Image (spheres, coloured by chain):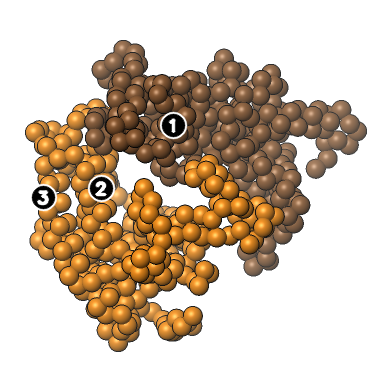
Chain colours: A brown, B orange
Amino acid sequence: MADKRITIQATRYDPDKDERPRLQSYEIPFSDDSMVVLDALNYIKSEVDGSLSYRWSCRMGICGSCGMMVNGTPKLTCNAFLRDYWPRPVVVEPLNNFPVIRDLVIDMDDFMHKLKAIKPWIIRRQEIPLGAGEHRQTNEQIDDFRQFSQCINCMLCYAACPVYGLNNEFLGPAAIALARRYNLDSRDQGLKQRLPVIADNEGVWECSFVGECSVVCPKGVDPAKAIQQTKLETTMRFVLPYGNRD
Amino acid sequence: MELGPRDIISRAMMTEFEEGHGFEGPHGKYLHLDVRHLGEDVIDRKLPFMRELGREFVGIDIVKDPIPVRPVQHYMMGGIDADISGATPMAGLYAAGECANVGLNGANRLGSNSLPECLVFGAAAGRAAAEYASSAKPVTANPVDAILWDEARRVEVAYLEKKGGDERIGAIREEMQHEMDTGAGVFRTKEGLETLVERLGGLRQRFSRIKIEDSSRTFNTELTSAIELDFMLELSQTIALTALARDESRGAHARRDFPERNDEKYLKHSLVFHRDAGKPRLEYRDVRVGNFKPQARTY
């Protein structure tokens, strides 16, 4: 075990110097069975090449910042174990479908704008003062949206989505799943404010139901289901008499 | 005991290790935390994230398996001196969250208190800062711009234009972590803290010879980790000096040589000033005690 080694091939790209991204190979010790791809990147940065750039923070699948392509699949690198790849080399690239800023770092502005556009917070027609108490909720009411609330904004679903790859105007899986999460929340009254965004041409109707988003989600969220439900619900509101009531 | 505050739990765990108990693992000794008696329903309802962490990262199911645990550094309880509206002694500068010391934690942080630190004190600091900004006199020249340019120049000279270092950032950071865990960890002593201060001085020396391979102006994370390490070394020194000057035990500060709390001398905040290039200056400020008086924790 002590002399086991593994090859990591990482995308290198510095816009000031390089015309296009290239892969750089590093052979590093695979010293511990619990090592993940992020540990390998940290080893390279700390011991071999300090200029390798990538995002990461929590190392426990909650901050959503270490998403990259690992052997062609979008993964949280904190949760991609080297033992599942060894003895083959591990190819680490920036998330698909996003502009690359540097090395493994992508530009996430587009997603941040979309996230904000669906107003991912509880909207009330009228705010009540703090002193008036909580908006209470039963466990059953939480179960209605619990799954969709697990999203950590890691953008793996955008990297996996062929529709977003072709048309980045598409609102995309995570933003629609989060819109669903709030629309299903018994405390929320913001559906009408979100409808223009989610029911728009570039909203749910752009989705061709490939379903890769739900396959790659590291938190068990099912954005494909959220999109199908939203298609149904927005249609019913349109065709049924009085369907457009709150 | 299992539901006790984390400082007491941490000391109990270290005591178990010292008495020769616990298991040997690849990252040092550990104990087992057993939640199996709660049953699957309660665990899924109340501890779903713990179950997920166990399954995803350790390969265990906490419904059936005990969880390997050991104490680690988890949270900064001190920080930038701020009042409950987030205002610092520097007019116009506000702090909230883990970087701030609003006095919420006292000597020991209780579970989930990072939430009020962000939500309650973050909102208060935001409101106070907005109020300050709208009532402050308009400035003709922008002093912030000048400060930013000065700082950008300092970073250029100190790191990017620097040539010929031979110390790796990662190596110094790792040694700092090890020294802090050893000298200022769960249990502390005068000797341990003195050694720590000395070793941090050595690491500071080595830091002046760090090597920066990345000269890019785009997303240079080697540069940011160098700047962070500079700050972490300063904070480590601050923690070590204040811990050494505090001849008592209080909350997470547990001195083996002074196991009792001494309210007469140390019911105070430690404040450290780095105004000049010389030695940091240590001062104290009284703690404002409200409805809840400090008591002995006898459970």
Asked if the residue under mark 2 is in contact with the one under mark 3, i.e. CB atoms within 8 Å, the reply is: no
Q: Nearer the viewer, mark 3 or mark 2?
A: 2
> Residue at coordinates 58% horizontally, 48% vertically from top-left?
B61
Q: Which of B44 and B89 lies nearest the eye of the viewer?
A: B44
Horizontal side of A239 relative to A10 (left or right) equals: right
Q: Is residue B91 above or below residue A60?
A: below
Horizontal side of B103 relative to B32 (left or right) equals: left
Q: Is residue A13 above or below residue B186?
A: above
Locate the N terminus of chain A and report the quarter of the image it occupies. Answer: top left
Q: Nearer the viewer, mark 2 or mark 1?
A: 1
Is disc 1 on the same chain as disc 3?
Answer: no
Crowding near the residue tagged with mark 2, few <14, some 14–19, many ≥20 C-alpha atoms within 10 Å: few
Disc 1 marks a residue whose amino acid type is: Arg
- The residue identified by callout 1 is A83
Q: Chain of mark 3?
A: B
- The residue identified by callout 3 is B205
Residue A140 pos. (x, y %):
76, 52
Horizontal side of B165 relative to A23 (left or right) equals: left
> Residue at coordinates 70% horizontally, 59% vertically from top-left?
A135
Crowding near the residue tagged with mark 1, few <14, some 14–19, many ≥20 C-alpha atoms within 10 Å: some
Q: Is residue B198 above or below residue B103?
A: above
Q: CA distance from mark 3 to mark 1?
A: 39 Å
- The residue identified by callout 2 is B174
Residue A12: name its quadrant: top left
